[in-house]
Amino acid sequence: MVAKNRSIVQSFKHVNRNVTYIPVWLTLIKHFFDCGWLKAFIIAVLTAIIFIIIAVIIGVILGVALITLL
């Protein structure tokens, strides 16, 4: 039972950490691009999409299994 509780606590820490990073990331985008919150969110989403596309292209070029990236 103790091991199960540890995994729940660890997963909560990861979720808490990720939830904390999102506003910080959006605030940095908002500051450096001098835009509003919605535009900062759109920039963040487009950046993530472009990152995934580039990762897939590099994976295809290098022959890396794309399943492992997800």
Image (cartoon, helix red, strand yellow):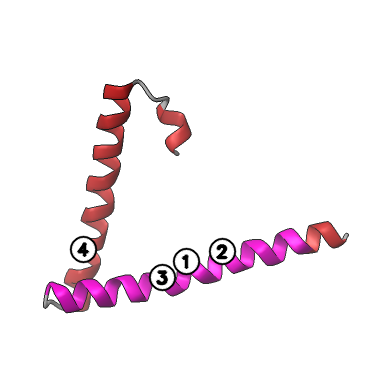
Please state which of the two labelled residues, at mark 3 or mark 4, is closer to the viewer.
3
Q: Residue at x 18, y 79 (%)?
A: 31
In the picture of the structure, the residue carrying the numbered disc 4 is 42
Residue labelled with disc 2: 14
Q: Is residue 34 magenta?
A: no
Q: How many marks?
A: 4
CA–CA distance in space, label 2 to label 4: 24 Å
Which amino acid type is marked by label 3?
Tyr
Residue 63: quarter of image:
top left
Mark 4, secondary structure of its residue: helix
Q: Tell which tag, 2 or 4, sits nearer the viewer.
A: 2
The answer to whether marks 1 and 3 mark residues whose Cβ atoms lie closer than 8 Å is: yes
Residue in view at x 23 percent, y 54 percent: 47
Label 1: how many Cα within 10 Å (few below 14, some 14–19, many 20+): few
Q: In the rendering, at what x and y percent does residue 51 appear? A: 27, 46
Residue lying furthest front in this view? Answer: 62
Image mark for residue 21: 3
Q: Nearer the viewer, mark 4 or mark 1?
A: 1
Quick check: 6 left or right of 22? right
Q: Is residue 48 above or below residue 65?
A: below
Residue 4 drawn at (x, y percent): 80, 58
Q: Which mark is residue 18?
A: 1
Distance from the alpha carbon under mark 3 to that under mark 2: 11 Å
In the image, what residue type sits under mark 4?
Ile
Q: CA distance from mark 4 to mark 1?
A: 18 Å
Among the two numbered marks 2 and 4 on one chain, the one whose residue lies closer to the N terminus: 2
Whether the magenta-drawn stretch holds residue 14 is answered as yes
* Residue 12 image position (x, y, % from top left): 62, 67
